[in-house]
Amino acid sequence: MVLNLHLLRIFQSVVEQQGFSRAAEVLFISQSAVSKAISELERQLDLPLIERGVGATRGRRGVQLTDGGQALYQHARGIFAMERIAIEEVRERVGLRKGWLRIGASTTVAGYWLPPAIAGFMKQFPDIDVELVVGNTSHTSQAVIDGRIDVAFVEGVVDDPRIDSTLWKDEALQLVAMKDSALATSRRPTTTALAQQTWLVRETGSGTRQVTQSFLASRAIVPRKMVEIGSNEAIARAVAAGAGIAILPAVVVADLIAVERVRAVVIADESLSRPLFRLEFASRPHSPALNAFLAVLADVA
């Protein structure tokens, strides 16, 4: 048995308006349509819902329900009360008075590029809960696929048909070394000199590591030694301490360069950069909260 909610809504209106004609006026349909709807509902349920006949109306006004009709009316009230709650909940989210926004980002993007946009969004929409999930490009892209985040911003290339990858912006990179090292003080280091260095790199799956590997491969450089460290900030401080050299985002090393703890190494009049991408699950529609955040991000980027 399938309960026809359209007919149930008409039945509820008849009961609450205490009459077929008043229900018809409220529902903007004819009285005969109301009568047919009630009869059809009774036929489908094989159950009388409204008392009919002289005995049912003598000395009493309005609509009189059978025992079955009374039970159904109570269920109808609950069903359509839940409908009203659902509509109000959706309206609050559409109006950005309630909701949740989950953003994923690789570590550098989360630490340097997104905070102004997140702060601006929270000021404009204080009733929206915001969660920032931080991980490398590989982990973050998987979170997009799993539906654990609404959007992600990463520095690595993601080749997966389930993900829409859109260029967001270009980020400047720098090859850095300890300020007093021979490499830092040389005008143009040779590939041989670069190969003799200890290279500090991020873990597999990191966009920063992808850039470093591409740089080395394009120049046929095989480093004497490579050390893996799972944080750009930790790598930058290791460089400052003399542990090795690294390619890092310019925003990460800007403060260390300013206080002369590390120095940018010039490479044959070449500037390094990498693209940053916005990731979304293919064909997944934007929520109102996500659209609002992307608008804020466009203003502060």
Image: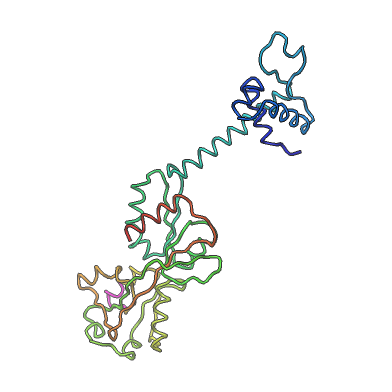
How many numbered marks appear?
A: 0
Q: Quadrant of the C terminus?
A: bottom left
* Magenta stretch in the rendered image: 237-243
Position of residue 208 relative to residue 129, above or below, is below
Q: Along the horizontal axis of the image, is 166 left or right of 37?
A: left
Position of residue 34 relative to residue 194, above or below, is above
Q: Is residue 236 magenta?
A: no
- Please report the residue visible at 71 percent of the width from the left and 24 percent of the height from the top: 69
- Please report the residue visible at 59 percent of the width from the left and 27 percent of the height from the top: 26
What percent of the width, then of the height, locates residue 41?
74, 31
Q: Depth check: 60 or 301 in front?
A: 60
The quadrant where residue 49 appears: top right
**Residue at the extreme left:** 259
Q: Along the horizontal axis of the image, is 259 left or right of 37?
A: left
What percent of the width, then of the height, locates residue 107?
39, 64
**Residue at the extreme top:** 59
What percent of the width, then of the height, locates residue 64?
70, 18
- Please report the residue visible at 67 percent of the width from the left and 32 percent of the height from the top: 8
Q: Depth check: 144 or 237 in front?
A: 144
Position of residue 257 relative to residue 12, above or below, is below
Identify the coloring: rainbow
The quadrant where residue 293 appears: bottom left
Q: Quadrant of the N terminus?
A: top right
What percent of the width, then of the height, locates residue 284?
53, 57
Position of residue 121 relative to residue 41, above or below, is below
The quadrant where residue 78 appears: top right
